[in-house]
Image (cartoon, helix red, strand yellow):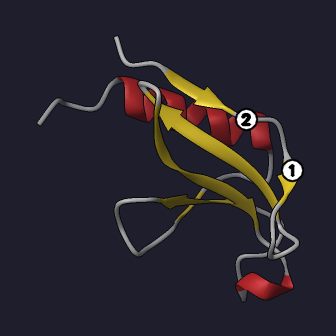
């Protein structure tokens, strides 16, 4: 089974609330809380995966966002 872990919230160098996401011990990406620096995605958690140059918008609730991502990653097909 895949192991998904989330760090505690911290403020990164861009002054954004951030949560690191790891998958099976490897860096997967970061959740960042959208604010005025992120354009129209204000007030929601945005996932920035390390392996693509795009973001995925999740919920305004961090726990709900983490639960959704964890379910998606644990149930994703293996390549």
Most extreme residue toward the left is: 79
Q: Residue at x 66, y 54 (%)?
A: 31
Which of the two residues, 64 or 21, is positioned nearer the viewer here?
A: 21
Q: Is residue 7 left or right of residue 66?
A: right
Q: Residues within 10 Å of mark 2 (few under 14, many from 20)?
A: few
Q: Are marks 2 and 1 in contact (CB under 8 Å)?
A: yes
- In the rendered image, the vertical position of residue 74 relative to residue 33, given as above or below: above
- Residue where numbered disc 1 is placed: 10
Q: What element carries label 1?
A: strand
Q: In this view, does 35 lie to the left or right of 24?
A: right
The quadrant in which residue 21 appears is: top right
The quadrant in which residue 57 appears is: bottom right
Q: Which residue is drawn at 37% across and 18% down?
A: 2
Q: What is the number of the mark on residue 7?
A: 2
Q: Where is residue 30 in the image (x, y as percent from the top left)?
A: 61, 54
Q: Position of residue 22 (x, y in %)?
A: 52, 35
Q: Where is residue 17 in the image (x, y as percent from the top left)?
A: 84, 59
Q: Residue at x 41, y 24 (%)?
A: 24
Mark 2–mark 1 distance (CA, rounded to whole Å): 8 Å
- In the rendered image, the vertical position of residue 5 relative to residue 64, given as above or below: above
Q: How crowded is mark 1: few (under 14 residues within 10 Å), some or many (20 or more)?
A: few
Q: What element carries label 2?
A: loop
Q: What is the number of the mark on residue 20?
A: none
């Amino acid at each position: 089974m895949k192991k998904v872990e989330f760090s505690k919230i911290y403020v990164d160098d861009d002054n954004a609330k951030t949560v690191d996401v790891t998958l099976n011990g490897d860096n997967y990406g970061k959740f960042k809380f959208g604010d005025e620096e992120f354009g129209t995605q204000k007030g929601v958690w945005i996932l920035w995966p390390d392996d693509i140059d795009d973001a995925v918008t999740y919920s305004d609730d961090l726990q709900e966002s983490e639960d959704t991502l964890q379910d998606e990653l644990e149930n994703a097909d293996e390549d």
